[in-house]
Image (cartoon, grey):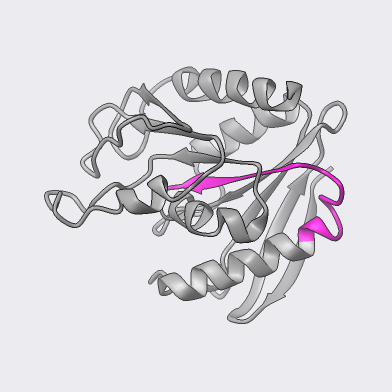
Amino acid sequence: MTTIIEIDTPHGPARAHVHPAEDGPRGALALGHGAGGGIAARDLVAVSDVARAEGFVVALVEQPYAVAGRRSVAPTHQLDAAWLAVVEHLRADALAGLPLVAGGRSSGARVACRTAEAAGAHAVLCLAFPVHPPGRPEKSRLSELDAVSVPVLVVQGERDPFGMPPPGPHRSVVTAPGTHSFSGDLSKVTGPVRSWLAELAAH
């Protein structure tokens, strides 16, 4: 049964939709949404399902601007501060005692990377990480990915106009059909995520 928790942050109330693990639980996965979408994005829902099957409690987190019904995304520092407030609350309550994997899609993946150390994340999952704005490779955000010192899995659309990150020392990159929104069957997204989470849980 899903539990919806409203959490006060420095920038207004956020909302966490907490889904129990099917077994276990062995870990926790907190996922943030993209700038233009919400937690109902099909890849977030599909990844949540496989994570729960692998014994992870999943928290889908709505940023305060989304809860308030605003369309324009909040500034970076507000997103990060709100995310950290949510994670702190969840780790003291619904996710207490569980090793945390932080992540999200697009903007949510960037937030998870920037805050990984402060959040105490054991690993980071990035769905469609926006390496640069479309057609602007000189505006690279790769430093946000490179700064993460824990294991990272990036699942990227093979034709994503936001770019393709390279693998790194702690970073695996897999491709799936589609652009910035994955297309068709999501098994090319969920399969690698399931394997990666199972390996993390085993350790």
Q: Give left or right: position of 95 versus 150.
A: right
Q: Residue at x 49, y 47 (%)?
A: 148
Does residue 10 appear in this view? yes
Q: Nearer the viewer, residue 41 or 180?
A: 180
Task: Return the x and y of residue 129 as percentages of the image width and height.
Answer: 38, 44
Q: Nearer the viewer, residue 41 or 132?
A: 132
Task: Return the x and y of residue 95 as percentages of the image width and height.
Answer: 81, 50
Task: Return the x and y of residue 136 as percentages of the image width and height.
Answer: 13, 53
* Relative vertical location of residue 131 with respect to residue 160 in this rendering, above or below: below
Q: Nearer the viewer, residue 179 or 96?
A: 96
Q: Residue at x 27, y 35 (%)?
A: 164
Q: Residue at x 52, y 47 (%)?
A: 104
User: Magenta residues, as a range?
Assistant: 90-106
Q: Residue 172 falls in which quadrant of the image? A: top left
Q: Residue 74 falls in which quadrant of the image? A: bottom left
Q: Residue 166 falls in which quadrant of the image? A: top left
Q: State yes or no: residue 104 in magenta.
A: yes
Q: Give left or right: position of 61 versus 26.
A: left
Q: Residue at x 57, y 72 (%)?
A: 81
* Relative vertical location of residue 147 with respect to residue 80 in this rendering, above or below: above
Q: Nearer the viewer, residue 181 or 30?
A: 30
Q: State yes or no: residue 49 in magenta.
A: no
Does residue 70 appear in this view? no
Task: Return the x and y of residue 152 as percentages of the image width and height.
Answer: 51, 36
Circle count? 0
Q: Quadrant of the C terminus?
A: top right
Q: Quadrant of the N terminus?
A: top right
